Image: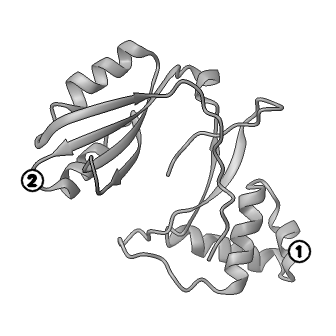
Amino acid sequence: MHHQIWSQTTGSVVFVARICGIRHDGAVAKDLDHVSKQIIEALQTDGRRSYASVGKSIGLSEAAVRNRVQKLSDSGVLQIVAVTDPLQVGFARQAMIGIRCTGDSVALAKNLAEIPEIDYVVLTAGSFDIMIEVVCEDDDGLLDLLNRTVRTQPGVTATETLVYLKLVKQQYNWGTR
């Protein structure tokens, strides 16, 4: 999930370590050892934390932590990103859009994932086949995205848009299992 989060107290960019859970080859990542889990949890707390600091807290060298983080990143298990407050960088409209479709929902989801304004795509069960999150500059941008891009995708039969009024809570520190 590629959500935005920012510091309420400073309004600054927050660096987030995110567990992706899906490797680049599409397989679900499992069987992380205890050390990898400790590294992930340390970086979820503070994604800008130095490898030396992480290593010191878990008993590894800086080089060993750097190597593990690189392997976790290369395999698609871990991603460290800077996320921003969308309002402060010119994106005044965020929305979640539920999509009903016919045909191959996986193919449609892959097509939607290629659209730059869409930052989150998930296949679902229930009222919608796919849920997407979009970030737009304004309501005109959202309307244009809906009418010219999302609703025109082959197989889309209906959409329902849930406009975000205020982000109350969002976190990335769910840890590992």
Relative image position of residue 14 (x, y in whole percent) = 72, 43
Compared across the picture, whether 51 is left or right of 92 comes to right
Q: Quadrant of residue 17?
A: bottom right
Query: Is residue 129 positioned above or below 51 on the image?
Result: above
Relative image position of residue 54 (x, y in whole percent) = 83, 69
Mark-to-mark CA distance, 1 and 2: 50 Å
Q: Where's the C terminus, which quadrant?
A: bottom right
Looking at the picture, tell me which residue is in the foreground, 34 or 129.
Answer: 129
Neighbor class of circle 2 (other Cα within 10 Å; few <14, some 14-19, many 20+) is few
Query: Is residue 129 positioned above or below 34 on the image?
Result: above
Relative image position of residue 34 (x, y in whole percent) = 70, 85
Q: Amino acid at mark 2?
A: Gly
Indicate which disc, 1 or 2, sits on the residue closer to the N terminus: 1
Query: Is residue 144 positioned above or below 82 on the image?
Result: above
Q: Amino acid at mark 1?
A: Ser
Res 103 label = 2
Q: Are marks 1 and 2 in contact (CB under 8 Å)?
A: no
Residue occupied by mark 1: 57
